[in-house]
Image: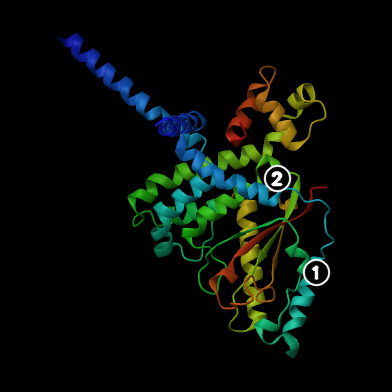
């Protein structure tokens, strides 16, 4: 009996705490995951040496080699990116284009909220575009670059994120997010990677 | 009798204002995600039908919606101006807060930088200029 009472008291206490902590529950729900994103992107210890021009060159060269013809035989092109703070986002585009679907505007807003959070203001980011495997690899590189550029442009022009804080790169299908399932839609996700501090 | 009616009308008006106040307040502090979600939901079909090939850019989207205002849905017409103004207000405040609050920060927050400086200014009880205080609120940093 006492146990039941205690449980009930605990339940009441929790309810009370929730009410006190969240005067406006809708907003709390909306901000909670955003805080997770800020946490995922913060805390870069040492800035890596990432040469974007060199990566682009490698990405253009690699499809010419037979060794990486099969997606399963394709190691990540830029393994150093994997070690950095990052978050992945589903952004949908019109087919074979860099026009963002209206259904994904919310996600763009969310990325903008995250990158302009006070805790992340000291950092610079790389927007990394990807495609799933299929079609011409060199074409996929171009499409993913245009898409990453489009996201960067929206963040800069619409949400006024400082252009000094953002660079964009497309890796096509050269750094598959799910290498075991090269044609899975998850491979189209856009990555935001923390790459350094604002100078 | 006439007076009672007038009092009733006044009461109804006050009630309406009270009910509307939270909605107005939330519109002012709408974050980017909420604003962009409303745009996508209210105008998505209109943009698909009339503005294919235009990306999420306030100037170009507004131009396209205006060009097609005869066919754009009432919901989209009602929502897009407040969405863009909320985004514009927050974006300008976030981009400009350090400049606007430069003097306040030097006076009140020593050498604090970025997040620490914003926290210092947002929590300062007095001494923050009206303009800086408003910019911090517009940015949603308080």
Disc 1, SS: helix
Q: Can residue A160 be seen in this view?
A: no
**CB within 8 Å, label 2 to label 1:** no
B11 displayed left or right of A73: left
Q: Position of residue B94 (x, y in %)?
A: 64, 39
Q: Is residue A176 visible?
A: yes
Disc 2, SS: helix
Extreme-bottom residue of the structure? A66
- Kindly identify which chain the residue marked by label 2 belongs to: A
Numbered badge on residue A120: 2
Sequence-wise, the earlier of marks 2 and 1 is: 1
The residue depicted at 39 percent of the width and 59 percent of the height is B46
A177 displayed left or right of A196: left
Between the C-alphas of marks 2 and 1, the distance is 25 Å
Position above or below: A100 against A157: below
Q: Position of residue B103 (x, y in %)?
A: 76, 25
**What colouring method underlies this structural image?**
rainbow
Numbered badge on residue B69: none
Q: How many labels does the image show?
A: 2
């Amino acid at each position: 009996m006492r146990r039941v009472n205690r449980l009930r008291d605990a339940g009441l206490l929790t309810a009370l705490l929730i009410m006190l902590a969240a005067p406006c529950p809708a907003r709390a729900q909306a901000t909670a995951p955003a805080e997770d994103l800020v946490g995922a992107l913060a805390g870069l210890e040492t800035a890596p040496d990432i040469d974007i021009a060199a990566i682009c060159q490698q990405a253009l060269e690699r499809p010419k080699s037979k060794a990486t013809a099969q997606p399963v035989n394709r190691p990540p092109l830029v393994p150093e990116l994997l070690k950095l703070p990052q978050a992945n986002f589903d952004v949908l585009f019109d087919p074979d284009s860099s026009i963002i679907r209206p259904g994904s505007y919310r996600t763009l807003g969310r990325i903008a909220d995250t990158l302009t959070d006070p805790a992340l203001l000291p950092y610079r980011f790389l927007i990394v575009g990807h495609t799933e495997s299929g079609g011409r690899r060199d074409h996929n590189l171009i499409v993913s670059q245009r898409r990453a550029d489009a996201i960067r442009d929206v963040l800069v022009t619409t949400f006024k994120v400082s252009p000094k804080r953002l660079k964009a790169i497309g890796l096509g299908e050269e750094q598959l997010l799910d290498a075991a399932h090269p044609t899975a839609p998850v491979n189209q996700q856009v990555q935001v990677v923390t790459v350094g501090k604002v100078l | 009798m006439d007076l009672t009616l007038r009092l009733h009308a006044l009461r109804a008006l006050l009630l309406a204002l009270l009910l509307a106040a939270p909605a107005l307040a939330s519109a002012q502090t709408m974050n980017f995600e909420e604003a962009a979600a409303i745009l996508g939901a209210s105008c998505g079909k209109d943009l698909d039908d009339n503005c294919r090939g235009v990306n999420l850019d306030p100037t170009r989207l507004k131009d396209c919606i205006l060009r097609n205002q005869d066919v754009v849905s009432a919901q989209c017409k009602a929502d897009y101006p407040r969405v863009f103004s909320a985004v514009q207000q927050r974006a300008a405040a976030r981009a400009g807060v350090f400049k606007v609050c430069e003097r306040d920060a030097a006076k009140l927050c020593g050498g604090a930088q970025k997040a620490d400086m914003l926290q210092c200014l947002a929590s300062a009880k007095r001494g923050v200029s009206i303009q800086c205080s408003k910019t911090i609120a517009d940015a949603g940093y308080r």
